[in-house]
Image (cartoon, rainbow, N blue to C red):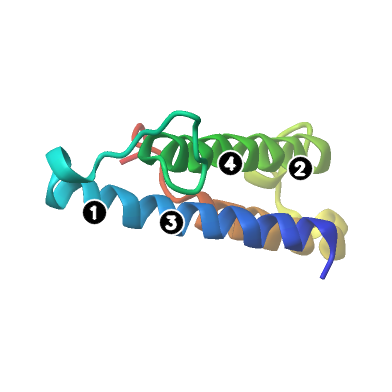
Amino acid sequence: MSDIEDRLAEIEGHLSVAHQEIGDVAADVRVRWRMSIPPRPDYDTDLIISRALDDGEKVASALRAVLTTADPDGMLVSYDANWVAGYMDAMEEVTAAITTALGASEAGK
């Protein structure tokens, strides 16, 4: 695995744990919300959820950087892809994968 694949697997793990934590807290918030001194990143509810949110922001920033670098003029959404078919087909696949991974924005719903 590459460093990027390793990091993505780690982020996916953080997101999974955060989803579980939110479900557990929702089931009984008075008993389940955990915080400790000193902080315990793999135990404290606030740190588990914050880590996943931080990771999500990093992924969104990385994907935005990829799109900006690969498609600085927004040509993927405004031009016919036939002029450089190989490149454009590949970029359309990347754009579709990123769009699927991020899902629809709240504004676009």
- Give how far apart the Cα atoms at labels 1 and 4 are: 21 Å
x then y, percent, for residue 63 = 67, 43
x then y, percent, for residue 88 = 79, 57
Determine the residue positioned at 87% across, 57% down. 84
Task: Count neighbours of disc 4 (C-alpha within 10 A) and say few if under 14, some if 14 to 19, many if 20 or more.
Answer: some
Q: Amino acid at mark 3?
A: Val
Q: Amino acid at mark 4?
A: Asp
Q: Which residue is mark 3?
A: 17
**Lower sequence index among marks 2 and 3:** 3
- The residue at the far bottom in this view is 1
Q: Which mark is residue 66?
A: 2
Q: Is residue 66 above or below residue 92?
A: above
Q: Is residue 31 left or right of residue 78?
A: left
**Lower sequence index among marks 1 and 2:** 1
Is residue 92 among the parts visible in the rendering? no
- Give how far apart the Cα atoms at labels 4 and 3 are: 12 Å
Describe the element under mark 4 as helix, strand or loop.
helix
Determine the residue positioned at 79% across, 33% down. 72
Report the front residue among 65 and 70: 65
Determine the residue positioned at 68% across, 63% down. 93
x then y, percent, for residue 92 = 69, 58
x then y, percent, for residue 25 = 22, 46
Q: Which residue is mark 1?
A: 24
- Give how far apart the Cα atoms at labels 1 and 3 are: 10 Å
Describe the element under mark 1 as helix, strand or loop.
helix
> Do residues under tags 1 and 3 come within 8 Å of each other at their CB atoms?
no
- Give how far apart the Cα atoms at labels 2 and 3 are: 27 Å
Q: Which residue is mark 4?
A: 55
Q: Amino acid at mark 2?
A: Val
